[in-house]
Image (spheres, rainbow, N blue to C red):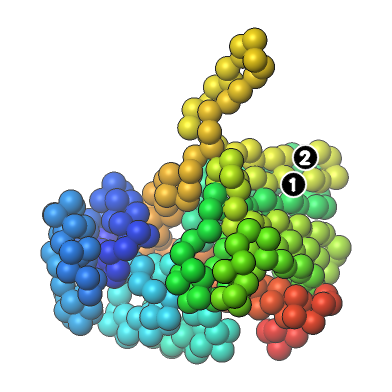
Amino acid sequence: MTVRFAILGAGRIGQVHAKAVTSTEGATLVAIADPVAEAARSVADRYGCDIRSIDDIADSDDVDAVAICTPTNTHADLIERFAKAGKAMFCEKPIDLSLTRVRECLETVKAEGATLMVGFNRRFDPDFIALKSAIDGGRVGEVEMITITSRDPGTPPIDYIKVSGGIFRDMTIHDFDMARWLLGEEVETVMAQASVLTDPEIGKAGDYDSVNVMLRTASGKQAVITNSRRATYGYDQRIEVLGSAGMVSARNMAEANIELATKDGFGTPPLLNFFMTRYVAAYANEIAAFVAAVADNAPMPTTGQDGLMALALADAAVKSVEEGRAVKVSEITG
């Protein structure tokens, strides 16, 4: 079976997924939709697909699946629309910035018997897959503590910050999902600290740029997440998992895996600059996993429930910062 795709949104992430779809065996890109004609034309010309409206895609008999890469405030409405249209759906995170709206959307997906995968690309990174495999294989014994470091090389535009939902829902949400995945248990308690250290304009926009979060499960397992909007040395993406029998870690990726030694000392190439270069393989693997699940009518590897729980942890972190205390996730989820 060939899964015939349409991509909604021809922005940066839409272009990433267009490349992934056209590189995946068993998938073909049929159409692109974007209100910016130039952006849609660029994707159409590069990958040889049609330009269609969202209305036309919903009614198209030659489209099996859609990748929703539009602004966050459109995700839930589009999921509901395409669930009713009978299309399989891949949606970038988050489904919505409101937990209530996410729940409503997932109820529609369930009622329609629709297929939905939420895009948490880091689960599909080859290094992180190997790390998870080591955990699942018992190589480090029982997981006890996890440290996740995720730092961007620079601040996004302030206009983006204002509509992002804040650092916890926009950036840390990836790390919340990774923590749930690696811990193997649901998080019970969230304690967060947040500051504005890199750009005062972020503070004026009502957000933070430097955060640390501690997560604790009911059994006592812990995960610490550290985020910054500024890492002058590149895109910093590291994970360390400590277990009862050992430790496993995933290191940063540089432009080349070499070390140069001279009279001036030892040096290595710069880190990969940002997510579009660091996670190329992850995005490709993610779309391939979606295609395989659609073709085999199999469960999705990342679900709407995963999206809901990651957002709940983000909401708990926001509440923790606002109230200066540890927050039980049950306070958020009810």
- The picture places residue 315, in percent across and down from the top left corner, at 66, 78
Residue at image position (72%, 45%) is: 240
Label 2 sits on what residue type? Answer: Met
Q: Quadrant of residue 60?
A: bottom left
Residue at image position (15%, 61%) is: 41
Figure check: 78 above or below 48: below
Q: Quadrant of the C terminus?
A: bottom right
Closer-to-camera residue (142/124): 124
Numbered disc 1: secondary structure: strand
Q: Which mark is residue 278?
A: none
The answer to whether residue 257 is left or right of residue 211 is: left
Task: Report crowding for label 1: few under 14, some 14 to 19, many 20 or more residues within 10 A (C-alpha).
Answer: many
Task: Report crowding for label 2: few under 14, some 14 to 19, many 20 or more residues within 10 A (C-alpha).
Answer: some
Closer-to-camera residue (320/128): 320
Residue at image position (20%, 82%) is: 55
Residue at image position (71%, 58%) is: 225
Q: Along the polypeptide, which appears first: circle 1 or circle 2?
A: 1
Q: Which residue is mark 2?
A: 247
The reply to whether residue 108 is in sight is yes
Residues tagged 1 and 2 counted as in contact (Cβ below 8 A): yes
- The picture places residue 35, in percent across and down from the top left corner, at 22, 74
Figure check: 150 above or below 254: below
The reply to whether residue 305 is in sight is no
Numbered disc 2: secondary structure: strand
Q: Quadrant of the N terminus?
A: bottom left
Closer-to-camera residue (210/246): 210
Q: Which residue is mark 1?
A: 241
Rounded to the nearest angstrom, the CA distance separating label 1 from label 2 is 6 Å
Label 1 sits on what residue type? Answer: Val
The answer to whether residue 272 is left or right of residue 14 is: right
- The picture places residue 46, in percent across and down from the top left corner, at 18, 51
Figure check: 156 above or below 126: below
